[in-house]
Amino acid sequence: MSKENAVSQENAAPATKGLAEVTPESVVEQLRALREQIPNYGQLSEPEARTLRPVSNIHPEFGQAAINAVGASQTVEATVGRSAEELQAAVEKAARWSTVRNELKATLDGVTSAILTMRHDFGQSVLLAYTVSKKLVKVPQHADLLPHVAAMRRTNRLGRTRKPPAQTPVPAPAPSTEPAPTPTRHV
């Protein structure tokens, strides 16, 4: 092995080692620390968010025209209380934070997929354990597995169809004792 190859393998080992040491708790801790650094971070109730959405979704050309109006008139700037440069910076800041939102959503989607894969791997293993245990309990020397197989059989949701709930018959409407109205003809 060459000296250069040995150095690159040494550098790669800590990077791989660091990834293996990540725990869910350490990620949560990092996320909570990150939240403290995000400006205006907070949770909104759905009614609060609903009231903010219409004004926050103004058309970009409308917003740019308003920034131009602020820049063209000191009266408009004084009324708004912000300069055209401040408004332009606010638009750009929101756009940059939108990129962060998109990355966080992609990360959430990736974590959701990772959890699904982890649960699937676990499910495959326990279903295999169930299948093997069901076969083994037929042999007397593995009778100690009987209570475990019984517990798995009782709680297994796969392969079972649920019985539809019993429907109570709806009584037929009682016949009316009043005579039916006679239709009138208009001529």
Image (spheres, rainbow, N blue to C red):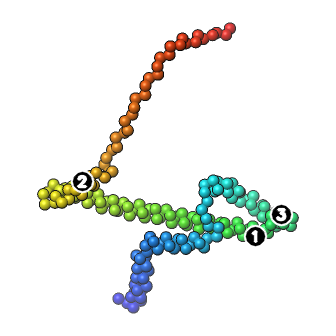
Q: Which mark is residue 150?
A: 2
Q: Which mark is residue 79?
A: 3
Q: Earlier in the sequence, mark 3 or mark 1?
A: 3
Q: Classify residue 151 by image quadrant.
A: bottom left
Q: Nearer the viewer, residue 58 or 158?
A: 158
Q: Quadrant of residue 50?
A: bottom right
Spatial CA span between label 3 and label 2: 76 Å
Characterize the local packing of mark 3: few (<14), some (14-19) or many (20 or more) Cα atoms within 10 angstroms.
few
Residue nearest the observer in this picture, 154 or 63: 154
According to the picture, the residue beneath numbered tag 1 turns out to be 86
The residue drawn where x is 31% and y is 48% is 159
Q: Position of residue 168 (x, y in %)?
A: 39, 32
Query: Looking at the image, which residue is at 33% across and 44% down?
Result: 161
In contact (CB < 8 Å): disc 3 and disc 2? no
Q: Is residue 46 above or below residue 16?
A: above
Which residue occupies the extreme bottom position in the image?
3
Q: Earlier in the sequence, mark 3 or mark 2?
A: 3
Q: Please tell me whether mark 2 sits on a helix, a strand or a loop.
A: helix
Q: Mark 1: which amino acid?
A: Glu
- Measuring from the top left, give residue 120's x and y in whole percent: 36, 60
Q: Nearer the viewer, residue 77 or 25?
A: 25
Rendered residue at 67%/54% (across/down): 51
Horizontally, is 1 left or right of 50 in the view? left
- Where's residue 64, x and y in %? 75, 62
Q: Is residue 127 left or right of residue 106?
A: left
- Give the quarter of the image for residue 13: bottom left
Q: Specify which label sits upstream in the sequence, 1 or 2.
A: 1
Q: Residue at x 74, y 68 (%)?
A: 88
Pointers 3 and 1 in contact (C-beta within 8 Å): no
Query: In the rendered image, which quarter contains the N terminus?
Result: bottom left
